[in-house]
Each structure stands twice: as C-alpha cells, then as structure tokens.
Image: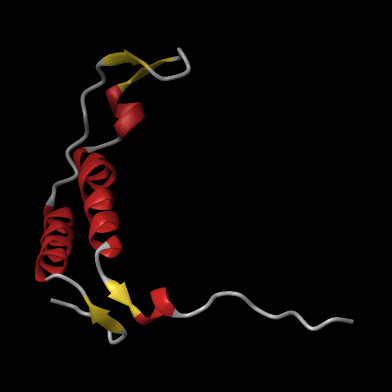
Amino acid sequence: MNIPKDVIEGPWYAFALQDFSCWICDRVPTIPFPAIPMIDDEGQATTWAQWWGDLNQWWHVTICSPVSYWANCNIRTAANHESTSYNWPSF
C-alpha cells in the first residue's frame, strides 16, 4: 500500500479500499461499448459508445473515482489541518 508521508490518521479500511479500487481500475479491460442508441440528458440522440466510451472509462467514472473520493475524505492529513488563508500585503 502506498501511504503518503503526511498522513496523520485514517481507518485501515479507507486505505485498503482505495488501494484495491485503484488496483482493479488498472486491470479493467478497454472493451468498447456497443453502438446502442440512447437519448442523453439534453435530448440529443447518441450511442453508448459515444456516451461512455469503453468499459475502463465507465468503471473509472462510476466506481473508482467515487471510492477514491470517499476514501480521501476519511483520511486526515497534515494538509487538512493547515490554514490555507494567505495574508496579502497591503500596497
């Protein structure tokens, strides 16, 4: 598991789930979706292949990214505790 140096604390399952999700995401094949017609959100006619691309892109958007977001929200790092405000000098 690749743990950053600035990690303060986090549940073990957040690290394990993120690592497993990324491992699976790297191994999902790039099988193109069939050209099945569909209507998109704006009412335009499109196909699954144009909308989703392939299985790897679909997996990354619908599974890997939300899991990584959830895991990162459950890992407290030093960057989360530092103030991001900057005192600009007055001219």
Specify the quadrant of the image occupied by residue 44: top left
* Residue 82 horizontal/vertical position (percent): 46, 80
* Residue 88 horizontal/vertical position (percent): 74, 79
What number of labels is visible? 0
Q: Nearer the viewer, residue 57 or 69?
A: 69
Quadrant housing the C terminus: bottom right
* Residue 38 horizontal/vertical position (percent): 32, 14
Q: Nearer the viewer, residue 59 or 87?
A: 87
| Residue under the image location 21 percent in, 79 percent down | 3
Residue 29 sits above or below residue 45 on the image: below
Q: Is residue 72 left or right of residue 27?
A: right
Specify the quadrant of the image occupied by residue 53: top left
Residue 38 sits above or below residue 78 on the image: above
* Residue 31 horizontal/vertical position (percent): 17, 38
Specify the quadrant of the image occupied by residue 77: bottom left
| Residue under the image location 11 percent in, 55 percent down | 24
Q: Nearer the viewer, residue 16 or 26?
A: 16
| Residue under the image location 24 percent in, 37 percent down | 54
Q: Is residue 84 left or right of residue 44?
A: right
- Outermost residue toward the bottom in this view: 5
- Colour basis: secondary structure
| Residue under the image location 21 percent in, 53 percent down | 67
